[in-house]
Image (spheres, grey):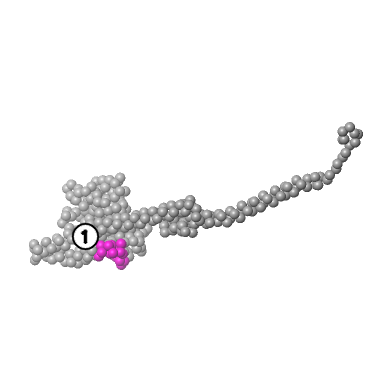
Amino acid sequence: EVPEQSWTVIVEQPVAEAYQTVGKMRRDLVLMLAGAIILAVLLGLRLGAKPVRGLEAMRQQAHEVARGNLDARVELTKLPHLDELRALAAALNEMTAALDRTQRDLKAKERLSTFARVAAGLAHDLAAPIAAARAACDAALTAPGQEGSVQLLRSAAVSHLPRLQRYVMDLRRLAQEGQIPLEFSFVEPRALADRVVAEAREFEKWEGIEILATGKAAPILADESLLHRAIFNLVANAADACLMRRPPSGQVCVEVATSVTSGLAVAVKDTGVGIAADRLPSLMTLDFKSTKRASGVGLGLGVAMHVATAHGGSISAESSAGQGSVFRLELPRIGSCKEGE
């Protein structure tokens, strides 16, 4: 309306034309936003590619370390010049190096511990043939013309001295190679048990103990020398347990049999002082700890357990205080050389 006039002016304009400017502004805004997004993406790809590759390299190193590869390292020269990223990679490399040093130290200590345990067992086994050879020499010097002296010398020459030589060779191999290899041959279990019993009867300290062998078993593939040592050590422990009775007396029986589940089963039974049930688990360990004063079980059990384990077998025990013990050695029909004793 025009003031003071009776006129009315009407101006008409198409809606599209009226909002054309607004549409252009919206379009320009969308284009600017899209351009900004594209620019940000391009800048991100260009500037962020190297940090991402650096993070991926550290992820791969962590994966390799988790798999046990402690030689894996992140190459710092290939990382972008970002102090935080390089500091993180350096820390990961230092941690991996520390883990590698720790593992090497543990392996060295483990090898030394294994050598000490096996050497202790070998030293223990040296005592028997040395004592037998000394007794034979003493008998030959005091009574050179008697048949018993000649028999002791023959036994020492045929049985004990070869065993002593094998033990010395085992010690040399242990020092040079880190283990004692098994020398397999077919062994007659009953004949081996009879030899062990005959040798044990020659020791004067077990003179009042009845020692015998029973049963029969099929031949088995094994290291005869090591198997002999294992059975003899079990017999020696059993005889010592009988000596601890008051008065010293008892029986030790070596029973051989063919096992249905394994191959060879050798049971060494005694009527000695026995072992309390709660002490058996601590005795049946491969730690070569001697507890002979309390139970008659010494280092020989640890040696026997290592021999059984090296053949893929095992040793179990049953005992009760005052009623004797039974130690069972079981070997598979086909011996498996897992590791040296």
The crowding category of the residue bearing disc 1, from other C-alpha atoms within 10 Å (few below 14, some 14 to 19, many at least 20), is some
Residues in magenta, as a range: 169-187
Say whether residue 249 is left or right of residue 87.
left
Q: Quadrant of the N terminus?
A: top right
Task: Note whether residue 234 is visible.
Answer: no
Task: Note whether residue 283 is visible.
Answer: yes
Q: Residue 154 is drawn in which quadrant?
A: bottom left
**Residue located beneath label 1 in the image:** 126
Q: Residue 145 is drawn in which quadrant?
A: bottom left
Which residue is outermost to the right?
Answer: 6
Say whether residue 172 is left or right of residue 83.
left
- Kindly identify the residue that appears in the image at 33 percent across and 60 percent down: 310
**Horizontal and vertical percent position of residue 147:** 11, 65
- Kindly identify the residue that appears in the image at 29 percent across and 46 percent down: 279
Which residue is outermost to the front?
Answer: 4
**Horizontal and vertical percent position of residue 192:** 26, 63
